[in-house]
Image (cartoon, rainbow, N blue to C red):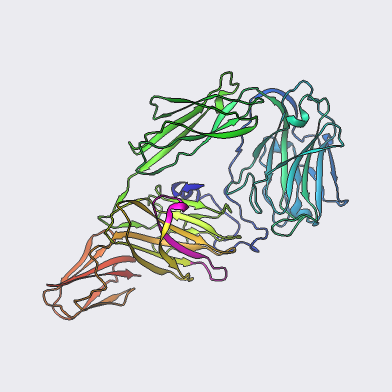
């Protein structure tokens, strides 16, 4: 999922880790100390028709602790937090101060773990036609499985696996998220509904025979559980949980609207009244056919479209309202969509990734979901105090970054310049650059550059054309076959190169050294009635002189570090060259 960098920039001051994110994360595919920014509860509790049973682990005697491999790798109940070599933080559950259940796989690390936490007493669910178990968890996966088991006789058990989409080294609920606590709701009606005796078991499963991607069973991270509740949901409870609407460049007057409808209730729902409105205008009303089973979700795309083409931003309110809905608080979802104006390249566009720079139109995408992506960082910048960095990683890289949009014309030539470097070369990462028609991998197809990475900054200077008139983006792609150290990009310049003729140098012009620090020499064979002008990246002329000899020296020691355009013009020639001042 893409995230605009304006959000990431605000996080950078609070995102503190106990190690450098420039170096490759420990042991490649092994465990590591990396942690994405923590957020609070992600789940939504369905409307409860009746609470059947609840436990906050304040009394450990309510639970039986056992394991199936005959060792001492067991659950503990109390307020102690994980304390192994790769400890994750303690759970921030609602009643954590009363105690919670912890399986510290990392601390125990026997290589053979099947640990069970089971209710001592049965729970009476008779008369409850639907039963949901709800609890708060905090978990990080590493070659293990987590399962909720339900039984009606304390002998035969039915498993409900959870955290199934969480990959090795990811936190719950998976991907780039790090939710503490993560609220889990599981519909266990198939076993527990209308049953007089119900037992609940939480099982951490990582025996020595477990086949995982790292080949290291029985030594994961930790799993914590708290505030467990069984309840009967209201029969009807529908809500909107997501929308496909996103910010973009020159948004359409016919933008498709797709929403995700979640059925939190105990009964299947069909013919769901849905609507959306833009900026408080007239609502578009339609009916999503369904059916949607209890504790399930489905997407619905409206037949009507939204006009997002007017104004700098639009507020879109989406809703699903079932007759008899017991919980109207989750019926609606409001989305703010920004409509960005394309950059006109009549003057050069410069992005230096400084705190005052506007990154709201830029976007990043963590394609492999490892929690590592591009973000501004205040270290090892080429220009100013910040560069943008793809952080060090512990797994194969697949990370994208796109600029905002530029208005470009077929037949014109454009210039892309940027500085790039890697933190070190022990764990290399490749970098390639594409022209794109949207901030999406599928449209990033026209190659602009493919870099040979070094541990010092290098200038990448490229020209390209576009196939048709329109709006385009520049996309940077960092990729590797294994974990890598960080890559930085800085001082990006996009400009119109039409009219620049460096190959046909009829004036016999030479500019050297380039890059320069103090002085540059300009040699012009056809110097009669010739002038030399120097422009900064914003198009401002900062030097102008009439040449009266073949060799001229220009002092650039007072120039700010960055890119400049040297332009030499005579009676029958015009020559331009990019100059880098360090």
In the image, residue 248 above or below residue 229: below
Judged left or right of residue 241, residue 576 is left
Q: Indicate whether residue 433 is drawn in magenta.
A: yes
Judged left or right of residue 118, residue 180 is left
Name the residue at the top extreme: 324
State the image quarter where residue 459 is shown.
bottom left
Q: How many marks?
A: 0
Per the rendered image, the range of residues in magenta is 422-444
Identify which residue is drawn at 58% across, 21% down: 325
Judged left or right of residue 468, residue 229 is right
In the image, residue 109 above or below residue 306: below
Identify which residue is drawn at 73% across, 45% down: 146
Q: Is residue 81 visible?
A: no
Q: Is residue 122 visible?
A: yes
Q: Position of residue 151 (x, y in %)?
A: 82, 34
Q: Position of residue 344 (x, y in %)?
A: 28, 51
Quadrant showing the C terminus = bottom left
Q: Position of residue 21 (x, y in %)?
A: 56, 60
Q: Name the foreground residue: 108 vs 286.
A: 286
State the image quarter where residue 285 is shown.
top left
Q: Name the foreground residue: 533 vs 209.
A: 209
Q: Position of residue 108 (x, y in %)?
A: 79, 54
In the image, residue 184 above or below residue 223: above
Q: Indicate whether residue 282 is drawn in magenta.
A: no
């Amino acid at each position: 999922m893409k995230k605009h960098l304006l959000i990431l920039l605000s996080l950078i001051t609070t995102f503190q880790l106990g190690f450098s994110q420039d170096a490759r994360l420990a042991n490649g595919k092994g465990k590591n100390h990396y942690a994405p920014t923590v957020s609070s509860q992600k789940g939504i509790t369905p409307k409860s028709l009746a609470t059947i049973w609840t436990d906050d682990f304040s009394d450990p005697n309510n639970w039986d602790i056992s394991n199936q491999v005959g060792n001492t790798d067991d659950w503990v109940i109390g307020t102690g937090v994980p304390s192994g070599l790769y400890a994750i933080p303690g759970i921030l559950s609602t009643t954590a101060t009363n105690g919670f259940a912890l399986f510290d796989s990392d601390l125990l690390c026997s290589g053979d773990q099947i640990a069970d936490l089971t209710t001592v007493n049965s729970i009476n669910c008779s008369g409850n036609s639907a039963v949901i178990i709800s609890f708060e968890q905090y978990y990080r996966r590493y070659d293990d499985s987590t399962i909720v088991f339900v039984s009606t006789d304390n002998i035969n058990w039915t498993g409900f696996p959870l955290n199934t989409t969480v990959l090795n080294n990811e936190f719950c609920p998976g991907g780039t998220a790090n939710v503490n606590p993560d609220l889990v709701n599981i519909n266990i009606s198939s076993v527990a509904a209308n049953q007089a005796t119900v037992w609940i078991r939480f099982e951490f499963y990582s025996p020595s025979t477990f086949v995982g991607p790292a080949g290291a069973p029985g030594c994961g991270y930790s799993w914590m559980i708290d505030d467990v509740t069984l309840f009967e949901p209201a029969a009807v409870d529908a809500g909107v949980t997501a929308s496909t609407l996103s910010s973009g460049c020159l948004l359409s007057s016919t933008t498709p609207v797709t929403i995700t409808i979640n059925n939190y209730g105990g009964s299947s729902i069909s013919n769901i009244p849905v609507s959306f409105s833009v900026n408080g205008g007239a609502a578009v009303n339609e009916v999503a056919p369904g059916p949607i089973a209890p504790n399930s979700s489905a997407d619905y795309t409206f037949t009507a479209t939204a006009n997002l083409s007017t104004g700098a931003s639009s507020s879109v309110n989406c809703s699903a309202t079932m007759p008899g809905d017991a919980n109207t608080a989750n019926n609606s979802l409001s989305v703010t969509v920004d409509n960005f104006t394309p950059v006109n390249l009549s003057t050069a566009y410069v992005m230096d990734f400084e705190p005052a720079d506007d990154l709201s139109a830029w976007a990043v995408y963590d394609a492999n979901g490892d929690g590592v992506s591009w973000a501004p960082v205040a270290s090892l910048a080429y220009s100013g105090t910040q560069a943008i960095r793809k952080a060090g990683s512990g797994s194969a890289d697949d990370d994208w970054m796109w600029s905002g949009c530029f208005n470009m014309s077929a037949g014109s030539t454009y210039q892309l310049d940027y500085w790039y470097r890697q933190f070190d070369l022990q764990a290399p990462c490749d970098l390639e650059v594409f022209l794109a028609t949207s901030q999406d991998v599928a449209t990033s197809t026209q190659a602009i550059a493919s870099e040979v990475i070094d541990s010092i900054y290098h200038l990448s200077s490229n020209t390209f054309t576009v196939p048709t008139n329109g709006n385009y983006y520049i996309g940077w792609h960092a990729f590797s076959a294994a974990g890598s150290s960080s890559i930085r990009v800085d001082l990006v310049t996009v400009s119109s190169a039409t009219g620049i003729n460096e190959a046909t140098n009829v004036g016999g012009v030479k500019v050297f050294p380039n890059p320069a620090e103090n002085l540059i020499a300009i040699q012009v064979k056809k110097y009669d009635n010739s002038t030399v002008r120097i422009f900064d990246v914003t198009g401002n002329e900062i030097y102008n002189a009439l040449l009266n000899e073949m060799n001229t020296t220009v002092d650039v020691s007072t120039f700010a570090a960055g890119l400049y355009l040297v332009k030499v013009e005579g009676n029958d020639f015009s020559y331009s060259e990019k100059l880098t001042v360090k």
